[in-house]
Amino acid sequence: MKRLFAVMMVLAIAATGLAFAGGQPEAEAKDDVFEIAMVVKLEGVAWFDNMRLGIERFNEEYDDVNAYQVGADTADPAAQVAIINDLIAKGVDAILVVPNDPESLVPVFKKANEAGILTFTHEASNQKQVSFDLEAFDNNAYGRHMMDVMAEWMGGEGVWQPFVGFLTSPTHNQWVDGEMEQMAEKYPNLVRPATREEDQENQQIAYERTLELLKKNPDLKAIMGSAMSTVPGAAAAIEEKGMIGKVAAFGTCLPSVAGDYLKSGAAQSIHFWVPADAGYATAKLAYMMLKGEEIVEGMDLGAPGYESITIKKNEAGVPVVYGQAWVDVDKDNLSDWTNADGSYKL
């Protein structure tokens, strides 16, 4: 942790070439170690357990960094704000967040910036008051891709239902937007859902809501999940009701969470990016800014899928970094993500 720092306001958006050194205060540590803290949505789940590995790898590779991950035991926006306030009081150099509710973070990010602390997000391309947001890929394209996979299994027709973790989750809703757009353009015989179900990043809620949907909608053929909780919760309900082959779960999840459901057929396809790589890449952005280095389009952030980044500004003027990091897993290639002892690699 730094003992003392000076704050210098910089605007480093180059007139040409999309070069950025950030639109937030640049903190200069007076000692030789930068303290970088990643605040995740929820601790104790496989996704963020994996993200911690990337933060730990970054910490090991840089001698002038103290990087670590923290999070609450509930996916509550207020809990994230409380953690960030603690980090501000601690005087860290950079705060990285995977937001539960981006809007709720704006005031506390402003407070951090005024204290000379840099702020960054992952999975929040509409975020304000940060130096950079990092996305694994273009969210609309990812949603369209998942729709293509699901629609092929459905034979291009039938009833489907999208889930999001929270109705305030920007990335989840952007994926569903892409799915809906692809459906409108390519799949006229798919039935447009009336709502987006919210499972609050909770597998039990996803399970219960799927049971309700199966009861109310006998023609339902597919559940599309955005939160990692949805596929296992929906697949468990599909198995319980003996509807494998008639109904299937799709969406963002990890092999360690959904692999057994892929084997049973209750889930047909999962899609994800490697959280550890995203954590590493976000930490690298923070480190580069703290070192006063430019962040430019086409550069390599040192993690798979982020070897040639693109950068676009969001509506708030925040530069958003995009990788090309999505992965598809189904029953046919599940073995690529399985260890010799039968456990899953991720």
Image (cartoon, rainbow, N blue to C red):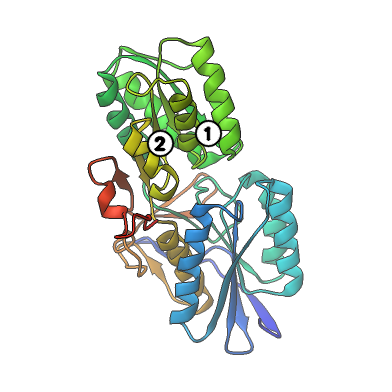
Label whose residue precedes the other's in the sequence (2 or 1): 1
Residue 315 position in % (x across, y down)? 51, 44
Q: Is the residue marked by circle 1 packed among few (<14), some (14-19), or many (20+) residues within 10 Å? A: many
Residue 4 position in % (x across, y down)? 71, 84
User: Is 281 displayed left or right of 97 in the figure?
Assistant: left
Q: Is residue 243 above or below residue 329?
A: above
Residue 252 position in % (x across, y down)? 42, 41
Marks 2 and 1: CB-CB under 8 Å?
no
Amino acid type, mark 1: Val
Residue lying furthest left in this view?
332
Residue 164 position in % (x across, y down)? 53, 33
Judging from the image, what secondary structure is the residue with disc 1 in?
Answer: strand
> Which residue: 35% across, 70% down?
302
Q: Nearer the viewer, residue 71 or 5?
A: 71
Q: Which mark is residue 248?
A: none
Residue receiving disc 1: 164
User: Is 145 displayed left or right of 238 in the figure?
Assistant: left
Residue 73 in view in this figure: yes
Residue receiving disc 2: 251
> Which residue: 27% across, 18% down?
156
Quadrant of the rendering where the N terminus is positioned: bottom right
Judging from the image, what secondary structure is the residue with disc 2 in?
Answer: strand
Amino acid type, mark 2: Gly
Residue 318 in view in this figure: no
Residue lying furthest bottom in this view?
31
- Could you say which quadrant of the image residue 304 lies in? bottom left
Quadrant of the rendering where the C terminus is positioned: bottom left
Cα–Cα span, label 2 and label 1: 10 Å
Q: Is residue 125 above or below residue 182?
A: below
Between disc 2 and disc 1, the foreground one is 2
